Amino acid sequence: MTTKSKKTKTAKKTKTAKKANKVGKSDKQTLGFQAEVKQLLHLMIHSLYSNKEIFLRELISNASDAADKLRFAGISEPDLLENNPELEIRVDFDRDAGTITVTDNGIGMSRDEVVEQLGTIARSGTAEFLNRLSGDQRQDAALIGEFGVGFYSSFIVADRVEVYSRRAGLASTEGVHWESDGEGEFTVAPIEIADRGTRVLLHLRKDEREFADPYRLRTLIRKYSDHIAFPVKMPVEQVAEEQEGKDQVKQDEDETVNAAMALWTRPRTEISEDEYKEFYKHLSHDFNDPIVWGHNKVEGKREYTSLIYIPPKAPFDLWNREAPRGLKLYVQRVFIMDDADQFLPLYLRFVRGVVDSNDLSLNVSRELLQQDANVEAIRTALTKRVVDMLSKLAKDEPEKYQSFWDEFGRVLKEGPAEDFANREKLAKLFRFSTTHTDSENQDQSLADYIGRKADGQEKIYYIASDSFNAAKSSPHLEIFREKGIEVVLFGDPIDEWFIGHLGEYEGLQFRDITRGELDLPDLKAEESNRNRDQQAEEHKELLERLQKELDGKVAEVRVTERLTDSPACLVLGEFDMGAQMRRLMEASGQAVPPALPIFELNPDHPLIRRLADESDAQRFEDLARVLFDQASLAEGRQPEDPGAFVQRLNRLLLDLSG
Ligand code: ADP
Ligand code: MG
């Protein structure tokens, strides 16, 4: 029998396995892991080998979460604490048996919870995530780290894992025993357990027995779990006893191995870089160090502490609307909820951290958070703090900032639309590709651009295509390249929308070079404006013929000032919707008003001259249409009728060779 739990849409574990596995109480049952769990277990054991010691951090982290949850539940239901309100975590070992035990007296799990939490991964996008793994150990280790391996990391060092758990508030007969060798199945059986909470018992693999050692365990706890807010206890070292040859020396005593104080409550000056980094890993389940962090205590009218981090990598589900995001919320050091997303705007959803408020009620709910003036004030302050932190990073450590931009730039671009107040600061944070470097690396700032602007230039010129390559080779750039005027190259589908919200920078408007009249800085414009009218007069006949030929497809046919190498290009009307916006709107099912492009010709181009001289009606038509469709292609668009385009082109090619 296998669990029939389906993948749930929400990020939280839900009780999908419940119905499928409901059985009589005394039964011991063998169940199958969800397919994704099997896959993850297999990959993890192989790729995380060099990080295997993290299993302890993960188990202690879970124990700490369980203690947090119980303390929170105890606010409204004090009975859950069962006369034992001292929350703690224990780590024990048995060198001879080769076992390690991690015990907590936190919230515990019911039978259904055990089956669900330890048998499935309910995080949405898991299957896609697993598909991205390559089989290359080193690459996959980093990816799995991003995903967060949690409880299953036990199987890196253990070939058998047992869990004993009893949910707070349930009878001692409602305990549950879970066991698995991590190969695909697990068993669950009812068992009597007097104390609430969870005990995880690892049977270490033969070659991992070195972990069952007091010195090793202490070192790991201090290294990874010092910041855990609950005491992590171990039996006092028996070494002393053996050495001194005395009986019963301190054998039954415990000592607290970690600092047992929530990290953010400690003064900044007393926290080491490593402690900050470890705390980040605990929060985020990330294996890598954060790029930067900020720790602040606010006192006065409102009192709260925040500790926020910028991760080094985008999580796999950054673009998943339902992915969990937000900060961990504490009220007066009591954990209230994960993923409190009211404390930061959506465009900063990659920020990880903790906020601990003294002003909110312990009974605060997600709904209440939405209307709380304290929350609003903290959100405004935290937003500013993150933006300032990024600004400082950009200034002081441009390389680190660049790595941040490469991961999160696209999210940050949502900023101007969402956060008008910080628009100017954000504008300084954006990075672009431009014709100055012609490189796909987005590493130029608006300040860089403005520093290079031409005499008399009062606009920021840009082109927005659906890819960097389409932008970079657009014919519209020809005149700008010739005149040495830099153009920003946008290649993200959201860029046109983004620019619409950004509007301007330091008084310079953004100007789309593919629309309206060519708009060059004054001095340069003079040169190129010179004989436009004269040209139009000169090519009047061709323009009229084309206008007739392309009737219904173009708003106007005119002589270009934009092109130096290409025969023709398409220009948007000054107020027409751009191609990107059009596609975005069409994709979201909205009606878009039709708009015909202006067809601009380069009369000096041999193909245009040939067109002007063409007397054969069919060939004129073929060449005119091919040139028109080509101009579409150069914008990254499809010809209206690709089949007809190919036929015409082939006819012309045959003519050539014939
Ligand atoms: P995560 O901690 O990211 O949720 P884990 O794989 O570490 O993922 O744990 C899976 C789930 O198992 C937890 O969310 C929790 O519900 C449950 N769990 C694990 N360990 C414990 C524990 N010691 N006490 C209570 N529940 C636990
Ligand atoms: Mg965990």
Image (spheres, helix red, strand yellow):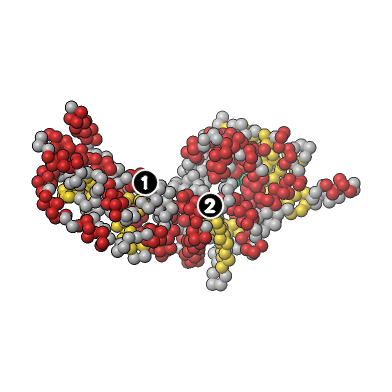
Quadrant showing the N terminus: top right
Q: Amino acid at mark 2?
A: Pro
* 76 relative to 416 in the view: left or right: right
Category of crowding for the residue at label 2, using alpha-carbon neighbours closer than 10 angstroms: few (below 14), some (14–19), many (at least 20): many
Label located before the other in sequence (1 or 2): 2
State the residue at coordinates (20%, 57%). 529
Marking on residue 10: none
Residue 367 x/y as whole percent? 47, 58
State the residue at coordinates (54%, 42%). 143
**In this picture, is 462 found above or below 2?**
below
Marking on residue 311: 2
Secondary structure category for the residue under label 1: helix
Of tags 1 and 2, the one toward the viewer is 1
Residue 61 x/y as whole percent? 63, 49
State the residue at coordinates (31%, 63%). 455
- Can residue 155 be seen? yes
Alpha carbons under labels 1 and 2: distance apart: 26 Å
Q: Amino acid at mark 1?
A: Phe
Quadrant showing the C terminus: top left
State the residue at coordinates (69%, 50%). 221
Q: Which residue is under mark 1?
A: 468
Q: Judge by depth and name the residue closer to the eye, 17 or 279.
A: 279
